[in-house]
Image (cartoon, rainbow, N blue to C red):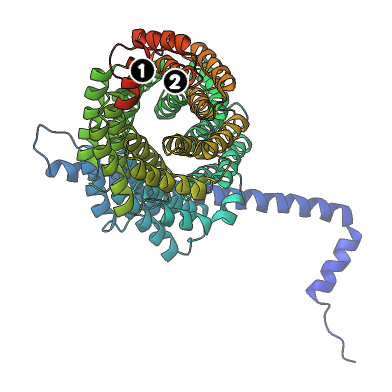
Amino acid sequence: MLAHPPSRWYSTRKFMRRHRGGVLTTFVVVLGILASTSLALWQAKVAREQAQRAEAARDFLLGLFEAAKEDLPRDERPTPDVLVRVAASKLDDDVRLSPSLRAELLGTLSAISYSSSDYAQAVDLAEKGSAVLSASGAGESREALALDTKRANALISLGRAEEGDRLLGERIAAMRSVADEVAVDGLDAYAGARLQMGHSEEARELAKASAETAEIAFGRGSEKSLIARAGYGDFLAAAGFNQEAAEVLEPILARWRASTSPPGHPFANSTQNLAAVKYQLGDISGGERLVREALALWRRIHDAPHERIADALYSLGTTLAAAEKYDEAEQVLQEAASMYVLLFGPMHPQNAGMADGLGSLELDRQQPAKAVEYYLQATSICTKARLESNADCARYWQNLSAAYLRMNKLGEAEAANMHGLELRRRLLGEKHPAYAGSLAGRASVLIELGKFGAALESIDQALAISSASGQSGSRSGAVMRRTRATALGRLHRSEEALAMLDEADALISRIQPDNTELPFSFQVVRAEVLSDAGRDTDARNAARLALKMAPKHRDISAQRWQRIQALSR
């Protein structure tokens, strides 16, 4: 074998054996230097990229304002809608922007459009942002999911809930994979979509999960988790779970008022929702106070016409009508109607809701024929625009039934009631408080049709659902008791009927002591029950008391009014 010099590796091994301690020390030091150098280089790279990103965003925004000014007279400032329009056109041409920054800016513009009620543009901008991320290989990123959430929210507001529901349903696994702000917003949006599609229980679980995720992501007691918890209360109010909504919203708003957090958009929204809950639970004065507070705040946040202002006006108008302040209610509702006309097309869901509100006002004013005209407008929009996956449409059909019943058009009343009843059964299920409302409406129709046994069965089912959902102590619960008393009276079970009326009277006196409409109607039923039981003197006294309570025709059909007048003699 030929001899050869020792290799470098051989020499190195021998050196390391002889000087193991010193070598290890030196090795650790070198590794530390390399790691520090790598970290410094990485941090410098990140800082450089962030600086470049900030510089690009700054230059884009400065150029945006300059471009917007060119489109306007000199004495006008760029408005948000002008800025969005100009920005969207400039984004396509600015080559300095990275795909990530371009998508982020498109998402911001989408959010601005959404807040300005320009939902079609919000959808378009979010779609463009998603396309940018997909083209750059980031189509499955959290940024892309955030854009999908923005797009879904705008689709729902456009009345295209099915598209929004499908979009978020495809992303639910990714949504739940990380507890972050994207998940909080996505779960909340998906809850809204599921509710619109009629899956109320699943929607409630999603909304609850959104609030719980916020506490994990932001920390319990943080401002963001507070807002998310209020959002859960808002969802419960929108879904008709009024007692639960009140239990969530009242302490949240109390904490908000006591904190240093500014009363902005979320606070105004939750205040308005609590006002609606108070109204549904029979606290009309409390509801009026809260909705006026919300309206004042919306006017400070937005310039009219704006959807949020119109929504608050609508809520205030219906509350004023319930308080029998009819002239002010009409003025407020007409202001809301004019805003909706400016903001939306004729087939938009908000216009259906506005027609329903005006119909209810006319019914309160004892103008059932005019009410029918408005309700037919509302139900026609639901049918023509294919909105009947929207649970609000069921309410419009139920109100139409009540107006027909007031006009003694029993066939039309029954058909409208059955349409609304089936919609609520399909969309909300048979345990929902709103379904109980349709069953109560059905009982009223059956009484007028002479089907007293079936009417009692229907109203008992309604009361059971109402009790199970915590709604039996509300104004609607008092009305249901009146309907049950009427059915019992027609079945010649007068003592049970009178006891039920006593219960209804006590309830409305406790929750709504200023209400005069319902006590009058209870007294009318009392006079009728006593007359049917052959207690003529007691019936006469009850009828006279009813006439003292309401000296003019109100809230009952002309035939029943004539009977009460006859009984009083």
On the image, the x and y values in percent for residue 540 come to 41, 10
Q: Is residue 206 left or right of residue 508?
A: right
Q: Tell me if residue 367 comes above or below residue 430 in the rendering.
A: above
Task: Check the image and name the residue furthest to the bottom.
Answer: 1
Q: Are marks 2 and 1 in contact (CB under 8 Å)?
A: yes
Q: In the image, what residue type sits under mark 2?
A: Glu
Q: Tell me if residue 495 comes above or below residue 400 in the rendering.
A: above
Q: Is residue 171 left or right of residue 565?
A: right
Where is residue 82, by image quadrant?
A: top left
On the image, the x and y values in percent for residue 321 come to 32, 22
Q: Secondary structure at mark 1?
A: helix
On the image, the x and y values in percent for residue 57 come to 34, 46
Q: Tell me if residue 104 comes above or below residue 457 in the rendering.
A: below
Picture disc at residue 564: 1
**Badge 2 is on which residue?**
528
Callout 1 crowding tier (Cα within 10 Å): few <14, some 14–19, many ≥20: many
